[in-house]
Amino acid sequence: MRSFHRLMLGLFVVSVVSVAPVAMAVEPVLTFTFSDLNGSFDSSSMLFEAVNRGDMTLGATHGDVTRLDGLNADAFFDGTGDPYTFFELKMTVSSPIPPLDADTIVDGVGTIKMVDVDGDILMGDVSGVWINNGAANFVGSITNFTITSDEGVFDGTDGSATSLVGLDGPYDGNVVTLAFGEWFTDGNDAFESFDDVTVLSQGAVVPEPVSLSLLGFGALAVFARRRR
């Protein structure tokens, strides 16, 4: 499953870069990947959520947070351990204006949050679009990304850690989320709830504000190369 996720992300990045090449001006300082998240959508509240799961029968969430700017190190998460360790992506979904086919593209605005084993917090605001290209494919930006840590380390569940020293934020970044097998609407373009959908979330955080084009085309391309 994870190799398929990486293939899908790689194909997406290659296709974007091929149609809109740009000079790489900013490289990320942090990247993150969380796979086998539990995705759900409530058509009444229009709230989409992707959160970590610990149920091995469904495939426990695995993830990592990596420092890249010369302090390359990974904090790994294996879906076990303290219940305060979690990943959470929440966003409100809406049809774009001017109206487009709700079976093809919708907007998403919300927040992303990661908490390590002793309560250190990485979080920010998220906004972007969901595109239906056979999978629910979210491409968006992260803003106001802040770091709250009392010891300057983001700790994984297996004793691994990545340094947060020198990172004070707020930062910007981007996030790609792929949810397989479901979309937000039924065959008549009416919004329809779902649950227990496996979701992959990946993103990159950069040290200074840049345009969304650089975030989407440059920083994520570096991120994809780093993950291979």
Image (spheres, grey):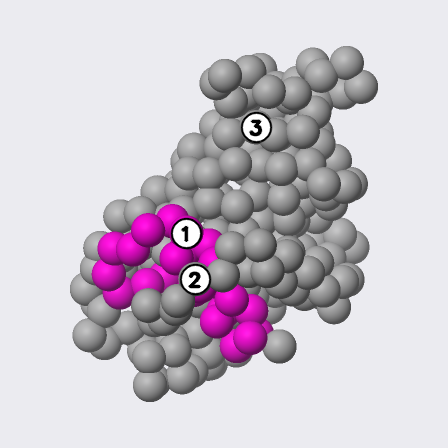
Which mark is on residue 22? 2
Residue 198 is situated, as x and y percent measured from the top left of the image, at 70, 48
- Residue lying at 48% horizontally and 18% vertically, measured from the top left: 97
Q: Nearer the viewer, mark 2 or mark 3?
A: 2
Residue at disc 1, secondary structure: helix
Amino acid, disc 2:
Val
Q: Nearer the viewer, mark 3 or mark 1?
A: 1
Which mark is on residue 176? none
Residues under labels 3 and 1: Cα distance? 19 Å
Amino acid, disc 1:
Ser
CB atoms of marks 1 and 2 within 8 Å: yes
Circle 1 residue: 213
Residue 36 is situated, as x and y percent measured from the top left of the image, at 67, 55
Residue 115 visible, this angle: no
CB atoms of marks 2 and 3 within 8 Å: no
Residue 189 is situated, as x and y percent measured from the top left of the image, at 71, 16
Residues under labels 1 and 2: Cα distance? 8 Å
Instruction: Indicate yes or no whether the magenta region holds residue 186.
Output: no
Circle 3 residue: 106
Residue 43 is situated, as x and y percent measured from the top left of the image, at 61, 19
Q: Specify few, some or many for label 3: CA neighbours under 10 Å numbering under 14, 14-19, or 20 or more.
A: many
Residues under labels 2 and 3: Cα distance? 26 Å
User: To which quarter of the image does residue 63 belong?
Assistant: bottom right
* Residues in magenta, as a range: 202-227
Mark 2 / mark 3, whichever is N-terminal: 2
Residue 145's place in the image compared with 67, above or below, is above
Instruction: Indicate yes or no whether the magenta region holds residue 223.
Output: yes
Mark 1 / mark 2, whichever is N-terminal: 2
Residue at disc 2, secondary structure: loop
